[in-house]
Image (cartoon, helix red, strand yellow):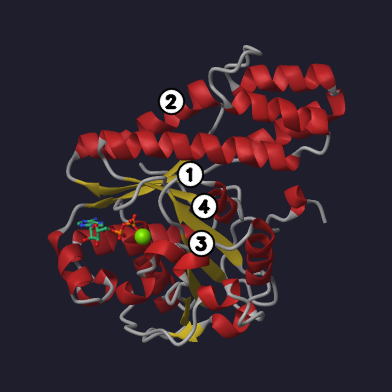
Amino acid sequence: MKRGQRKGGSRRTGRRSGSQPRLLPLGGGKGGVGKSFLVANLAVSMARSGHRVVAVDCDLEGANLHTLLGLRRPLHSFAEYVAGRETDVRKLAEPTPVENLRLIAGTGVDLGSAQPEQNQRLDFLDSLRGMDADFVLLDLGAGSSASVLDYFMVSDDGLVVIAPEPTAVENAYTFMRAAFYRRLRLAMVEPEVRRLVSVAMDQRNESGIRSPYELLREVERLDPAEGVHFASVMRAFRPRLVVNGVRGTEDIRLGFSIKTLCSKYYAIEPEYLGYVSYDEQVREAVRACRPVVDIAPDSSAAVYIERIARKLAEGPGEEVP
Ligand SMILES: Nc1ncnc2c1ncn2[C@@H]1O[C@H](COP(=O)(O)OP(=O)(O)O)[C@@H](O)[C@H]1O
Ligand SMILES: [Mg+2]
């Protein structure tokens, strides 16, 4: 199988018994913007609605998803797979205090070789598609390294978590651009086209390719068949934005402006999936190692999270009104 073909099958559907689980990665480029908090709470919310959910901590160097779900010492970990001690990914998933929700933790890392090699990473992701579950949520580490991007590219519409502050916004753009170009490069078969994509990844490249549209024209010129494929991969890439920690309408509007700018300058057409308010009860829930959707279901953060969880579970929902 070609690397570009590894991505998951069907698009958004609800209950998925008998089919592959839907893989939902949460990334965003910046640390501390709420990725792990959202993975934990979305996973709990979806599980409480009756979906079979597995939450996976892919942030091996900063693993803390287990703590947010109230598991102090997980029995198993993705790290065992990386170290070659367990090859069956299904055996890594352990129950959580929440019915229908299992966790693949990221603890117990050998700091000497914390990250899996690319092939091992891709095999792990392939195995997740064989899990007996409806949804598999992936908690990604910070940054836009190849390893983080591979996890993000398990689907074409992964979630990008953004905090309403310039540094987080900047990192989110970098993250989306990096994911987009990596996606294009892996999807292309012709070595010459792949080389062109690599050239275009450098914004100041000497070939003068300044945007994905210019890159597309170059690819079409080089190989018309690859040009058609390239354009379809470009269109399929639709990350979904979540603005976390909003304190007012200006923060809410941020999602729309990022969407517009992505479309205008980067040829990326994200969907604005939703936002979550800044809420002191989140901090209290984190301190108590409990999901906010459980201990404060009426808090504004919990209400917005439930709304996003419903959209994720119920199919192609509407964008933020
Ligand atoms: N909506 C929110 N309101 C208030 N605090 C939040 C919110 N989202 C996240 N936080 C705080 O930010 C901290 C960092 O979140 P975390 O999920 O660990 O970030 P990341 O995984 O992106 O590095 C959390 O422990 C929590 O205290
Ligand atoms: Mg985290």
The answer to whether residue 300 is left or right of residue 320 is left
Residue position for label 4: 148
Q: Is mark 1 on a helix, strand or loop?
A: loop
Q: Quadrant of the N terminus?
A: bottom right
Asked whether mark 3 lies closer than 8 Å to ligand 1, one says: no
Query: In this rendering, which labeled residue sits more in front, label 4 or label 3?
Result: 4
Q: In which quarter of the image is the C terminus?
A: top left
The Cα–Cα distance between marks 4 and 1, rounded to whole angstroms, is 6 Å
Three-letter amino acid code at disc 2?
Answer: Leu
Residue 118 sits in which quadrant? bottom right
- Crowding at dot 1, Cα within 10 Å, few <14 / some 14-19 / many 20+, comes out as many
Three-letter amino acid code at disc 1?
Answer: Ser
Residue at 18% x, 72% y is: 287
Three-letter amino acid code at disc 4?
Answer: Val
Residue position for label 1: 144
The Cα–Cα distance between marks 2 and 1, rounded to whole angstroms, is 19 Å
Three-letter amino acid code at disc 3?
Answer: Glu
Query: In this rendering, which labeled residue sits more in front, label 3 or label 1?
Result: 1
- Crowding at dot 4, Cα within 10 Å, few <14 / some 14-19 / many 20+, comes out as many
Marks 4/1 in contact by CB < 8 Å: the verdict is: yes
Asked whether mark 1 lies closer than 8 Å to ligand 1, one says: no
The Cα–Cα distance between marks 4 and 3, rounded to whole angstroms, is 27 Å
Q: Earlier in the sequence, mark 4 or mark 3?
A: 4
